Image (cartoon, rainbow, N blue to C red):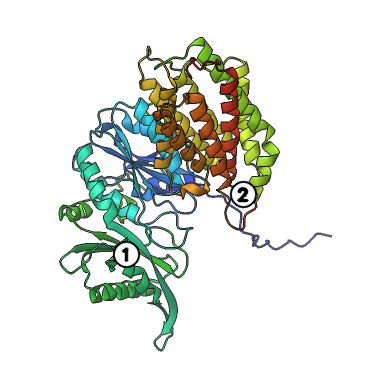
Amino acid sequence: MEQPEQPPQPPSAEVPQVEVTVRDALHSLTAVNQDLFLLDYGNVIIQRRYQSLKTVRLLGGGLGGGDLCQAICVGRGMLTAAILGEDSVPSSRDILRTIKELNEGDNCGVFVIVQAGPDLFNFGLAVERANADCRSRVKLLSIDDYKGDDEKVRYSCGFILLAKVLGAMAELGFFFDEIYNCYENIVEKIVTVPLHYEHVEVGLLKRQSVVLTQDFVKRFQTIIDKKSQFNLSLHPSVPTVILINTSRALSRLAELGLVKQVIEKLKEWGVSIIRLYYGSFITMTLRTAYLTVMKIFDMKIIEYLDAQSDASGWHQVCQFLPEITFQREENPGLLQKSGKQEIFKGAKLGQTQSKICAKAIEFGCEALMSCERQLNTIDQEKSRGNMGSRLRNMAEHVQKRLINSKLSVDCPYALFKKLGVMAESAIGGAMGSIYGVLFETAANVFGDLPEEEVVTPFVWARVYSIAANAVQQYSTERDDVNMFYPIRCAEQVISKEMAKGQHYLQAFGLGVSVAEEAAIRTKLPLCKYPDVGAHAVGIWMRAVFEAVKLTSMPDGCDYL
């Protein structure tokens, strides 16, 4: 018997799971703004014309996540390029490669614009390395305009305004120093505060609207109160630029209603608004908007804000191809991949000093490896409990190279260069970048010394001091709660004792003791253990000191 024909089955109700990566999103930007394309590594979006630009070039970047606020600022009149991470900050290697790419050709230098916070270390490390390799100047420009209490806020709209002003200046051909002077003048005149609001129903149709909470009054007082450290000294004669960053969840009616309320409040307080921008520049949480205020010291700033830009983050587009398509082409860039080449320059160590240096590295590695479980236990109190394993990974890599004679212990420049790269990759995270900055700075100082210069204890002390200052430059946390605290405390004591004429072993020993005590003091209230990074510093510093003391000549005439 013939079976009846089965009716067609309805399509499955299940929605296929599609993972959208940061790179996928950047490809979409190349369809919206056809003056952009992607490089073939990392998540780098760049202006198509960058190779022919003879002006200052601007690079932005940070964590990709769900918001691409740096990428949407790439375009004529704003950023030249942006580099984003996927689930974390991009590596300093990719950042450095992008800086070098921008540094190719005839240009006036590179500015790297970054929001102050966790991103600074990776970008700072890349800038430190770039300044040693690039022929034109590279400088990091950070902005810390957010003055709210929410520590989860990673980016704010001060970055957008800063990129627009400096990007317009670069487009107009201003020189490196002129742009940097403008940055110094405006960066402290930009403040961002939260705008909290409540949803209400209005009218016969019960339309959804919003009203500002009283919290906004308190927040804005930090800008206009003369006693506040964030006071901008605003009054009717001072021109002001306002940017209101709203949530995408708001209806257009509610959004414009919020803008109206903000304008009315600012007028009540005598704020002179000459430019107003609003919209969803950066993704916000529900029931939260942000108000960015920029005090204008020079009316030319308004000209730069009004200047043409095709960056999609400035609500303009550039579409010149016959059809809107994803720009799938990828460019390998101007830099050619070449084999790793170790450079030996700067002051060198004698045979005895090299042996002492090797023994110090050996002791430091063994100490960290033997304390793996202890450090993991300490780290487990606040984090993932793997810091001991990460430091052991670093120590094993260093020890293996030392045993196989692949560490140039007689050339401090090459040695610290290698240690910086290994620390960043083997340890990872912020701690890896901190050690990277420390070692990279030390390498550059040694590399600048004449080859014939004798490396005395005073040279070591000076290098340590400069390296510690470099780490502090990129730190935004309190010094007494992290690994930098024992490093700084030891540096201060060693410098002081050496200046008094103390023997280097005595000065070093006092510095190590102070570092160990400082590490203990990083223990926070209600915590059982001190900071794991600070504790690790105390461990390897003690081991290095014992190695130096053991191998140095009894009369102390040998230099280290």
Q: Which mark is drawn over residue 228?
A: 1
Q: Is residue 479 above or below residue 495?
A: below
Q: Which mark is drawn over residue 433?
A: none
Q: Is residue 95 above or below residue 62?
A: above
The residue type indicated by label 2 comes to: Ser
User: Quick one: label 1, few (<14), some, or many (20+) residues within 10 Å?
Assistant: few
The residue type indicated by label 1 comes to: Ser
Residue 366 pos. (x, y %): 65, 27
Residue 287 pos. (x, y %): 45, 70
The secondary element bearing badge 1 is classed as loop
Q: Which residue is mark 2?
A: 383
Which residue is at 46% across, 36% downward? 493
Residue 307 pos. (x, y %): 20, 51
- Evaluate whether residue 336 shows in this view: no
Residue that sits furthest to the right in the current view: 1
Residue that sits furthest to the bottom in the current view: 204
How many angstroms separate mark 2 from mark 1 (CA)? 35 Å
Closer to the camera in the image, 114 or 459: 459
Which residue is at 47% across, 24% downward? 503
Q: Quadrant of residue 500?
A: top left
- Quadrant containing the N terminus is bottom right
Q: Nearer the viewer, mark 2 or mark 1?
A: 1
Q: Quadrant of residue 281?
A: bottom left
Residue 248 pos. (x, y %): 42, 65
Closer to the camera in the image, 66 or 169: 169
Closer to the camera in the image, 327 or 36: 36
